[in-house]
Structure formats: structure tokens, C-alpha cells
Image (tube, helix red, strand yellow):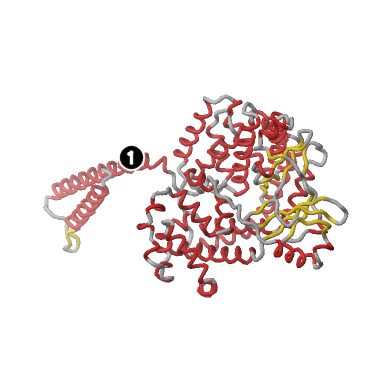
């Protein structure tokens, strides 16, 4: 860890200085980095009224933008996590822009020639020096191949991988340090979050991975002439250069152009929703960033999807959870919604089910007053994730990408056709999933999978019993049962049992006294001796002492 800090000392300073400048210096101070890196006191935001007057979300957005591509990407990814980040901060993170000045064509030419190991003229008949678009990780140029085919070429920024890897290494270092010093960092599993972010960014850096994602989406719509996905030219694609079919169209948020060129916005809206739900609920592999710039309208009301650097993946189980949630919400079934939430994510052991159900009831009541046609799927899913966040239930990343995707699509559709109900379009897909559950083939497959799991369990059972027996012999078995709802009942039961014990002690004490008195009277003596030892008096004294101790302990417990 120390070697990493020394190797990246200047970048450490940049990051720690930015934390301090935007009002987050207390985090670095708790990690011991303020003194270690000798951060000047003048960087404190106490003297910067402009920064101090901004909200936490605004300061966080400016902080990420200043630190560059890695942190901008992190902010964009985190903005899809309502289960981790409060909504007011997400609203600011959604404003993050990674539009940056393009890098010179000389560097573009050098990268292409290094990747293809030949002069650019031998790869392309034409290559535009000015990019069509520039972002933090790369930029896109128009070009044509020697065959005359028109293509779009995405070229990665020079040295961007090294820069991002350095930042990710530092962030993982800071996450380890935070979990070793801060209780909240352990509670929210900061290291795991940083690892997920690092994985997402590294996938986006690999243009070959984006090419494979593009082809997988294309296979979903191979028989649908109304949906176009750009073809990948693998002969001119590497991890740093992606060459694909050039598609020219109108962005879906350019409504005036769409009207002027005679496009039917209602058809476009329904087509977008239908294709997105096919990706999500039927194929389980969907575009993770379908903003208006990534969806184009082509002649004939055809739609084209672009840029598959971020995608979401849903297992059959996840698709079933989404369908169950929508159906449970429609049926106002709180228990089923809670069951869906717990099945979706990792539920902490100390979750308060009573409060969780109360929050779900509140969410359900909100949607009771909304007609079926007015319900927004993205909003409902993200509000569900917000409930999960409040109860520290961790939702899988792919499901949060789903929530973000639905919200983005709803924003596009609202401009194209405000009267279109996304839920209504999604209803047939949800019903199809429910029907698929009951198909004999699927039921048999599910039963078979369970039988396979059970057979594995049975195979491991002898070993498990042996290990458990070994632990019992060593006296290391510990059983904890916690039922918060029974606390009051158990306290009352404890109080009653103590009162009952007190009564028995008094009764026993009375019987002993009566027995001693009667025995002494019949014997005509005041003491019973055995080998000159007053046994009755000693026993009476010990009984009295034990009774007093028991009574004292009951009163002291406060449960009498």
C-alpha cells in the first residue's frame, strides 16, 4: 500500500486536495491523509463562500468533473444506484457531462496505425480529421473503407487506460484504508462497491467487449426490420479501436426535426418501449444507456440503437422478480412486494421487517390512487430501490441499471407521446413471464434443478454432520435466536415468572418455619442436635439467606 502511495504520490495529492477543496476534507482527515500529504490549510472551503453555498450534490458533481474521466464515469455509474445513493445527490450526478475537447488527429492516426500495424491509408480510403463526437474515454470519426463502405470509428484517448488504472488503484487503496478505520465504510462495504465500479469501467474501456455486446443485441432483432443495430467490422476492431457501420438518423429528442421530416412520433415511442421490454423481459440482455443520443430515427419510422459500452444482464430469476413486483403492486399485495424485495437483494440480518412492510405499504398506497395507464415503470422500480436503500438491502448492479434504463426510456417517450403508458405496453411481457413459469417444461426444469441441488446437499451431508459433531465436541456451538416482535411478550413472561418464583420462595419459607416449630414442640425442646450440631438452625439460616438472595436479585433486575 505504501509503495502505491509513493508511486502515485502526485495523483494522491490531486485527489486529496479536491476532496478538501469541495468540502469533503473531513473524510481524508479521518483516513489520516491530510497530515500525511501536508495539505495546505488554505484549501479549506471555510474561506470559499462560492463552494460553501452549494449543496452536497453540486459539490460532489464539481469534484468529480475536476478529477477527470475515471471519476466522471464513476459518477455516471453511481447515478444508477438509488439503493446506495440518496435521490437528491443522484439528480446532480445525472448532470455529469463527459463532453471534452477532442484530441488531435495526429494522435488518432498514431493509435490506429499502432493497432492495425499499417499506415492509415492502407486501412481507410477516407478518414475525417474532425470527430463526430468526443467524450472522456474516446471519440468517434467518420470514415470509409477501401471497399467504399461507410463506417464510424471509435478511437480511445491516448494513455487513458493507464490514467484510469492509476485512479482505480488509488480508489481501491482508499477503500481498504476506509474499511480499516471507519465503521460506516464497513457497513456499506465500500471495497465491494469500488470493485464493482472498477469492473464496469474496465468493461467500457474494452472496445472488443462493446463489439460483442452490439452483436448480441443485433441477434435479438435479426428478424425485425424496424430495428437497426450497427454491424461490427472485426477486421478493423481492437480493444482500442472499434469500427462499425455508419448510421445516419435523427436523435429522438430532436422532436422538431422528426415532425419536419414526417416521422410518426407515436409509432416511434411505442416501438422504442416495445424493443426495450423485449431486451429486458424476454432476452434478459439490454442497452444500459439508452439516452436520446444513442437512439436514432431512420426513414420508415425505423429505430437504431447505438453505443453498447454499458449493458445490463438479467437472469430468469431476476426477470421473474421484476414481473412479480409489478403484479404485486397492481394487486396491492404488500407481503408479495416485500418478498420480491428480499428475493432481489442481499438482506441484512437485522432488517426490521415491520418498518420495511410499513414503507412498502406507503409505496403501495401511492400507486392505489394512480390509474394503470398513468403508472411509470421506471419511477416505481426506482422507488422500490429507494425503500431497499433505507433498509440497507443491497440490490444487484444489473437491476439498478434496469431502473435507470426505464427512467431514461420514460423521459424519451414522454416527449414523443405523453399519452403512451409504458406499463400498458409492458403488460403482455409480464404476463408472458408468468405463463412461462407454469409451462410443464419450465416447471420440470425447475424441479430437476432443485433435485440436483438437493442431491449435492445430500452428498455433502455426512461431511457436514461430521464437522458439526466435531465442533460440538469442542464446545464451540453457539445458537442465537432473535425475534424483535416477541421482546415485550418475553419481558412480561419474565416478570410473571419472577413473581411466581417469589411466591414459591415465600411459601417454602413459611412451610419450613411451620415444620421447625411443630417438630420442636413435639420433641419438647428448642433445638434439634445431631452429634451436638444444630442442623435445623443451620438449615434454616441457609434457607433464609438463599431466599433473601433470590428476592434481592429479582428486585434488582427490575422485572418484578
Point out the residue furthest to the right here. 147
> How many marks overall?
1
Q: Local crowd at mark 1 within 10 Å, few (<14), some, or many (≥20)?
A: few
Q: Which residue is mark 1?
A: 492
Q: Residue at x 27, y 42 (%)?
A: 499
- Placement of 367 over or under 318, stated as above or below: above
Return the residue nearer the eye: 72 or 29.
72
Residue 395 percent across, percent down from the top left: 56, 47
Residue 356 percent across, percent down from the top left: 47, 39
Asked whether, in this view, residue 162 is left or right of residue 9, the answer is right
- Placement of 421 over or under 28, stated as above or below: above
Residue 39 percent across, percent down from the top left: 41, 67
Quadrant showing the C terminus: top left
Asked which quadrant contains residue 264, the reply is top right
Q: Residue at x 80, y 63 (%)?
A: 120
Asked whether, in this view, residue 329 is left or right of residue 438, the answer is left
Asked which quadrant contains residue 496, the reply is top left
Return the residue nearer the eye: 202 or 443.
202
What kind of element bears circle 1?
helix
- Placement of 415 over or under 447, stated as above or below: above
Residue 514 percent across, percent down from the top left: 18, 44
Amino acid at each position: 500500500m505504501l509503495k502505491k502511495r509513493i508511486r502515485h504520490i502526485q495523483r494522491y495529492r490531486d485527489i486529496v486536495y479536491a476532496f478538501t477543496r469541495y468540502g469533503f476534507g473531513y473524510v481524508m482527515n479521518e483516513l489520516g491523509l491530510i497530515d500525511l500529504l501536508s495539505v495546505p490549510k488554505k484549501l479549506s472551503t471555510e474561506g470559499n463562500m462560492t463552494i460553501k453555498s452549494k449543496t452536497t450534490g453540486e459539490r460532489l458533481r464539481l469534484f468529480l468533473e475536476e478529477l477527470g474521466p475515471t471519476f466522471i464515469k464513476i459518477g455516471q455509474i453511481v447515478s444508477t444506484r438509488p439503493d446506495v445513493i440518496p435521490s437528491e445527490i443522484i439528480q446532480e450526478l445525472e448532470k455529469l457531462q463527459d463532453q471534452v475537447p477532442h484530441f488531435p488527429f495526429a494522435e488518432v492516426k498514431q493509435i490506429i496505425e499502432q493497432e492495425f500495424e499499417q499506415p492509415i491509408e492502407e486501412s481507410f480510403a477516407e478518414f475525417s480529421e474532425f470527430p463526430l463526437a468526443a467524450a472522456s474515454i474516446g471519440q468517434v470519426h467518420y470514415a470509409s473503407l477501401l471497399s467504399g463502405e461507410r463506417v464510424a470509428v471509435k478511437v480511445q484517448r491516448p494513455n487513458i487506460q493507464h490514467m484510469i488504472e492509476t485512479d482505480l488503484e488509488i480508489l481501491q487503496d482508499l477503500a481498504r484504508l476506509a474499511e480499516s478505520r471507519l465503521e460506516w465504510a464497513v457497513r456499506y462495504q465500500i471495497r465491494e462497491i469500488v470493485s464493482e465500479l472498477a469492473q464496469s469501467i474496465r468493461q467500457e474501456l474494452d472496445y472488443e467487449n462493446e463489439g460483442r455486446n452490439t452483436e448480441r443485441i443485433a441477434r435479438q432483432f435479426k428478424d425485425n426490420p424496424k430495428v437497426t443495430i450497427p454491424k461490427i467490422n472485426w477486421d478493423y476492431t481492437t480493444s482500442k479501436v472499434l469500427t462499425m457501420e455508419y448510421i445516419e438518423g435523427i436523435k429522438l429528442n430532436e422532436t422538431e426535426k422528426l415532425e419536419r421530416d414526417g416521422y410518426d412520433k407515436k409509432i416511434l415511442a411505442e416501438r422504442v418501449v416495445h424493443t426495450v421490454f423485449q431486451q429486458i423481459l424476454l432476452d434478459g440482455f439490454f442497452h444500459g444507456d439508452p439516452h436520446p443520443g444513442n437512439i436514432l430515427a431512420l426513414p420508415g419510422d425505423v429505430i437504431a440503437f447505438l453505443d453498447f459500452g454499458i449493458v445490463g444482464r438479467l437472469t430468469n430469476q431476476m426477470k421473474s422478480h421484476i414481473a412479480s413486483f409489478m403484479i404485486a403492486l397492481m394487486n396491492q399485495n404488500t407481503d408479495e412486494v416485500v418478498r420480491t424485495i428480499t428475493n432481489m437483494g442481499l438482506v441484512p440480518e437485522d432488517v426490521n421487517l415491520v418498518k420495511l412492510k410499513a414503507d412498502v405499504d406507503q409505496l403501495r398506497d401511492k400507486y392505489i390512487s394512480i390509474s394503470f395507464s398513468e403508472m411509470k415503470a421506471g419511477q416505481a422500480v426506482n422507488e422500490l430501490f429507494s425503500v431497499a436503500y433505507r433498509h440497507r438491502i443491497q440490490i444487484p448492479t444489473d437491476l439498478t441499471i434496469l431502473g435507470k434504463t426505464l427512467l431514461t426510456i420514460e423521459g424519451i417517450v414522454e416527449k414523443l407521446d405523453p399519452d403512451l403508458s409504458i406499463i400498458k405496453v409492458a403488460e403482455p411481457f409480464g404476463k408472458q413471464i408468468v405463463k412461462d413459469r407454469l409451462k410443464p417444461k419450465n416447471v420440470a426444469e425447475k424441479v430437476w434443478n432443485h433435485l440436483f441441488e438437493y442431491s449435492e446437499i445430500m452428498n455433502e451431508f455426512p461431511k457436514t454432520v461430521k464437522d458439526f459433531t466435531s465442533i460440538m465436541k469442542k464446545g464451540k456451538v453457539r445458537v442465537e435466536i432473535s425475534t424483535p416482535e416477541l421482546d415485550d411478550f418475553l419481558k412480561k413472561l419474565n416478570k410473571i415468572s419472577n413473581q411466581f418464583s417469589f411466591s414459591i420462595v415465600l411459601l417454602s419459607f413459611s412451610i419450613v418455619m411451620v415444620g421447625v416449630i411443630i417438630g420442636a414442640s413435639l420433641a419438647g425442646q428448642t433445638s434439634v442436635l445431631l452429634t451436638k450440631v444444630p442442623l435445623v438452625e443451620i438449615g434454616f439460616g441457609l434457607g433464609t439467606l438463599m431466599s433473601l438472595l433470590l428476592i434481592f436479585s429479582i428486585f434488582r433486575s427490575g422485572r418484578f
